[in-house]
Image (spheres, rainbow, N blue to C red):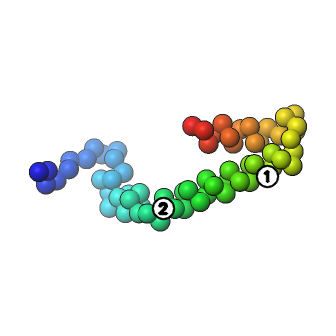
C-alpha cells in the first residue's frame, strides 16, 4: 500500500489549498451551476436572435462548451 504520494512541482494537489479547493464537492456544484446557467442563457439568446449573421455569440459559446 502506498503511504505517501510524491507529487510534481506543478501539481495543484501538492498544495493544501489546491487539494481542498479541487476536491471539494461544493466547487464542482458551482462549476456545474455556472455552466448550466451559461448554457440556458445561450439557448434563450439563440431563440431570441435566430439569425446567424447577428448571433455569433451562441455559436462561439456552444463550440466552447463542447470542448
Q: Residues within 10 Å of mark 1 (few under 14, many from 20)?
A: few
Cα distance, mark 2 to mark 1?
26 Å
Horizontal side of 38 relative to 53 (left or right) equals: left
Kindly state the secondary structure of the residue where label 2 is placed.
helix
Horizontal side of 52 relative to 29 (left or right) equals: right
Q: Farthest residue toward the bottom?
A: 26
Q: Residue 38 in the image: x percent, y percent?
A: 68, 53
Sequence-earlier tag: 2 or 1:
2
Asked where in the image residue 9 lies, by quadrant, the reply is: top left
Q: Which residue is mark 2?
A: 27
Horizontal side of 53 relative to 60 (left or right) equals: right
Q: Which residue is mark 1?
A: 44
Which residue is located at x 87 percent, y 49 percent?
48
Q: Nearer the viewer, residue 3 or 36?
A: 36
User: How many numbered callouts?
Assistant: 2
Which residue is located at x 74 percent, y 54 percent?
41
Q: Residues within 10 Å of mark 2 (few under 14, many from 20)?
A: few
Q: Would you say residue 54 is visible in this rendering? A: yes
Horizontal side of 5 relative to 54 (left or right) equals: left
Determine whether 49 is above or below 40 in the image: above
Marks 2 and 1: CB-CB under 8 Å? no
Which residue is located at x 86 percent, y 41 percent?
50
Q: Residue 6 in the image: x percent, y percent?
A: 20, 47
Q: Farthest residue toward the top?
A: 53
Q: Residue 21 in the image: x percent, y percent?
A: 41, 61
Which residue is located at x 36 percent, y 51 percent?
12
Amino acid at each position: 500500500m502506498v503511504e505517501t504520494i510524491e507529487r510534481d512541482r506543478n501539481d495543484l494537489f501538492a498544495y493544501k489549498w489546491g487539494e481542498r479547493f479541487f476536491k471539494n464537492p461544493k466547487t464542482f456544484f458551482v462549476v456545474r451551476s455556472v455552466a448550466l446557467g451559461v448554457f440556458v442563457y445561450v439557448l434563450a439568446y439563440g431563440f431570441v436572435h435566430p439569425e446567424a449573421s447577428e448571433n455569433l455569440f451562441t455559436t462561439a459559446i456552444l463550440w466552447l462548451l463542447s470542448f
